[in-house]
Amino acid sequence: MVKVMLQSSLIPSLSGTSGIPAIPLNILKQQALAALESLPPFSPILDKLKASLTRQDDFALLGDLIEKDPVLAGWLLSAVNSVLYVRHGNISSVRHALSVLGTEKVRDTVVRMSTVCLVHQTRTPAGWSMERFTRHSASVAILSDLIAQRSAVEFPEGAFVAGLLHDIGRLLIAVGLPDEFESILREYQSSGQTWIECERKILGFAHPELSSAALAVWKVPEPIRRAVAEHHDPVPLQKPGGPITLGWVLNAANQYVNSIGESILPAVKPDSAGSAWIESMGLDPEVLELLLADFQAERVAIAPYFD
């Protein structure tokens, strides 16, 4: 995990035009990444996971729980991709990670996370909801995976994890830079600019690159990191019949999930309407209809995890 010591002498006391301290941009990014130490999982899912470990549930049930929470999944992938476990390249699947680590190691990780939550009592700013963040991330993961199953996609095995972790940078900003997050939110609500544009104005960087940097710390495979970094600005589609980049899949899934109201913010301004980006992949209309029907069924199935 990243530990960053911020010396007060490096942080100017003068405020910028936004009304927050004019902290050097590299320090802001380091401060956000340092929040990886204390990211809170979504409490209801963490509680269900602890209960499952007590009952000695199998890996499939444990995987179902962990795959609903970006923070739990990130910590698990970080643990399994450490030098103690990796033998033949980084692991990109939660189920695979579980099979390598075993129940005892997962239990140790969950206990550690619970302790971190108690010790740090993580503060999140006004306008942030862990439930909305977790629901949105899980929905994008499910839809990305469904698209990858029905299209020629580069690194399709990473679609689910990429979708689950694509917005971890937004959580890092909320936890590590709460004052800046509130400034971004005010700018977004008043300026008519996109969230990405507001982030760049206030921070000098945006959450996709921060998400990718966090995944590098967690040792998530490079194709997933690249897709996450470009999920708001994906590489153009290749010629008809060629493979689609994973970044394009994430962009399409993210926009569709936002358009149906499953957004991180209470009210979001979608960049595109409905399934336009998914349709641009050239899927047969009947396949697309079945894909979206499967997605809605999956959303209904995961709802109890958030109660």
Image (cartoon, helix red, strand yellow):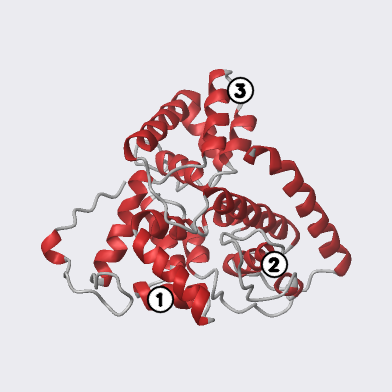
For the residue pair 185 and 303, the one nearer the viewer reads as 185
Rendering coords of residue 202 (x, y %)? 37, 74
Foreground disc of the pair 3, 1: 1
The answer to which of marks 3 and 2 sits earlier in the sequence is 3
Residue located at (56% from left, 36% from top): 44
Q: Which amino acid is tagged 3?
A: Asp
Q: Residues within 10 Å of mark 2 (few under 14, many from 20)?
A: some
Q: Which amino acid is tagged 2?
A: Ser
Q: Which amino acid is tagged 1?
A: Arg
Element under disc 3? loop
The answer to which of marks 2 and 1 sits earlier in the sequence is 1
Residue located at (30% from left, 80% from top): 17
The answer to which of marks 3 and 1 sits earlier in the sequence is 3
Element under disc 1? helix
Question: Looking at this rendering, what residue extends furthest in the right direction?
Answer: 286
Tag of residue 200: 1
Mark 3 and mark 2: Cα distance apart in space: 36 Å
Rendering coords of residue 213 (x, y %)? 38, 60
Mark 3 and mark 1: Cα distance apart in space: 44 Å
Mark 2 and mark 1: Cα distance apart in space: 23 Å
Residue 234 vertical placement versus 102 (above, below): below
Tag of residue 298: none
Q: Which residue is mark 3?
A: 57
Q: Do the CB atoms of the residues marked 2 and 1 lie less than 8 Å apart?
A: no
Quadrant of the snapshot with the C terminus: top right
Residue located at (52% from left, 48% from top): 70
Tag of residue 259: 2
For the residue pair 85 and 260, the one nearer the viewer reads as 260
Rendering coords of residue 68 (x, y %)? 60, 43
